[in-house]
Image (cartoon, grey):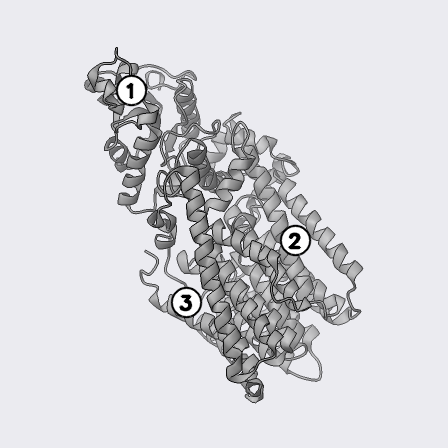
Amino acid sequence: MLLDGKAWLIGGYGALLAASAALPFLLACWPRLRAVSMDVALGAGIVALAAAIFWSRGLNLGVVPLLVGPLLVVPLAGRSLAPALGGLAALPLLSTMVWWDAGSVLGPWRLGGFIVAGFGIAALARLVTRDAGRATRAIVLILLGAVGIVSASSTGVYAAPTAFWVLWHHWSAYIAPVEGLLSGGIPYRDFLVQYGIGPTLLIAAACGEDCWTGMYAVVAATNTLHLLALGGCVLIIARPAAIGATALAVLALVAAVTLWTAYPPDWLGGLATPSVGGLRYLPVSALLLRVLRNNRRGVVWDGWETALWLLGLLWSPEAAYCVTLIRWPCLALRMVDGGRATGVRAVAPVLRCVGQALGTTVLALAAASFAFRLWFGDWPSLAGYLTYVANPPGALSPNLLGPMWLAVGAALAAMVAMVRGSALNIRQANAALLGLMAAACYFLGRSHDNNILNILPFLVVSLTAAAVVAGPRLIGGFARTVMAGIVAWGASLGGGGWLEVWRSGKAFEIGPSRLLSRIGFEGADAATLLDRHAGLPAGRSAEAAAALAWVRSRGEGAPVLVSATMLLPRHPAGEAWTGVNNVANYSLLPPAIMERVVRRGARRFARPGWLVIEDGQSASWLATFTASYEVTERHQTGAYTAYRLAPRCEQPRAARQVSPAMPPEEAAGSCATTFMRRSAAVPSAEILAPSSSPSRNGLGSADR
């Protein structure tokens, strides 16, 4: 459950969120608060955080932050020691990013790259002081678009074992609910939707003969648009800054999006994990861009901003929280600034905005529920909608010495920017900070150190606001050093997969064709890659491919694979026979939830299908299905057993074709009876005995 052992984390997040949301209103209503040394206290908090991390970890910080990291601070040296102090405070917090290598030991080439990139980027902000014009910003956006396209087109690394498995595994979690939808299931009832109905509908619209080609197109497009939206956010915030400072922020953003969100222990490229890219965050980044634009132009109410909020509200539960947290406080602040109200008089526009938020949200959700009812013939299930919110997969205990403190430091820096800035600076820093706090809810669920790295793009946007306002002060030095460190610490990323594909000559594969053929088990290299990644006996995944091929030859829908690899087999769209069609989406949920979805799917889909189970997997999978299905046939292929399952449920009336010649039990609609008659079911003794028939590829039990 979400709250298990994390009450202190959620409480701390709530307190920081409350302070972040309340501060701009306090400053707008009571300007005299600026006279209080609030910025000094917040800056001292950042230094204290850094000191605590340094004290706790000591020499375990590693050689890089202790000996080489100070080079990032050299360009900050000047008449005041405050920027350099802020830069030094950033180094212990930056060192926590490398959670897989606490010692931060770099070889000569990597160390050289760290020094050149880190020092060069840090110096850039000071050396290039010419103002950035409109043409420069346009060129930056074009270059960001090119980076997105190149990242989406480069598929060579997915010829390496880990990268190939990670991509297949993560894409499976998105495509599984799409298959349930295209097969006639009702979302949140007949199948669960882990990442929200928005991505599910988008991928379904892109499906052709199967959904994997469409998935590639959707991931590529949303990732590129996400990068462009975040780039636009940085450029809008940094508009008063010189071209060097803007370049520092943009390069930090590129590193955050393309490197740090792609599993840095073994850099996997831009396609492997869509759940940390555009498919998850595009509604959030797009809304944040529009809010920042409206803040700068002084626009109070904007139809496009409302439309983007509605998109996020319906996209997923997480996106609904994020866009609501960003949109309404920012709108309320613009209403306060627009009315130039101070003191108690500023409360009225805030209350009016709260009323608008509540009323609009209720109307939007009611309209969406009625549309759901008209489309699917049933109401959405609130329990199904919130399943993954209440049961985050793979939840861990937070690391008290991990990178979460870097996010806290960035939040404090943005709050300092509010205290020191103009009314416009307050609005921009507030929006950027709320974007960071919204994205940080991801960490509340799983609480893995890598989750903080996944939200580094929003952290860069927040730090840009701090750097622009603080300038040559402690917070400015902290913000610039963190952004330079995000680039420099890229030298610590693992690249074993890239090195392997470089040696094999596959590093420059472009486009999805070879990748998708591997997912379809076309050729022997796919099975070999899976065996190597999972540490399976040689030929084990080839046996899985043979078992799946045998099942497909029966023409009874998409097989469900229960194996250590936790993958969704590639097959034509719309052939699902159960909502539990991908192990990864359900294996970490409470068993009662999976049993309910299996039972609902047996009634809804009312068709037979095949369950392919690897030897050694939990017997609970078969037991869960046989509570709602009857085993009518069994086939052995190597280490994999295929079970043909026919539903025990009552068929939906519309799906039955009752004729006078039907036996009474079939006319009554017993699914198991009907499908067992049609398949000439084998006796129970044969169901429980291993099959002696060889598979088409010669890997059946008789040839084993």
Q: Name the residue under label 2.
A: 228
Q: Position of residue 416 (x, y in %)?
A: 57, 77
Query: Toward the viewer: 410 or 310?
Result: 310
Q: Where is residue 52 in the image (x, y as percent from the top left)?
A: 46, 75
Q: Name the residue under label 1.
A: 675
Q: Name the residue under label 3.
A: 400
524 sits left or right of 473 in the view: left
Per the model, the C-alpha gap separating discs 1 and 2 is 52 Å
Estimate how packed mark 3 is, as few (under 14), some (14 to 19) or many (20 or more) residues with alpha carbons within 10 Å: few
Query: CB of mark 3 within 8 Å of CB of mark 1?
Result: no
Amino acid type of the residue tagged 2 in the rendering: Leu
Q: Position of residue 211 (x, y in %)?
A: 52, 33
Which element type, helix, strand or loop, lies under badge 1? helix
Q: Position of residue 502 (x, y in %)?
A: 63, 40
* Residue 68 seen in the figure: no
Residue at position x 40%, y 42% from top? Answer: 373
Per the model, the C-alpha gap separating discs 3 and 1 is 56 Å
Query: Toward the viewer: 559 or 281?
Result: 281
Amino acid type of the residue tagged 1 in the rendering: Phe
152 sits left or right of 356 in the view: right
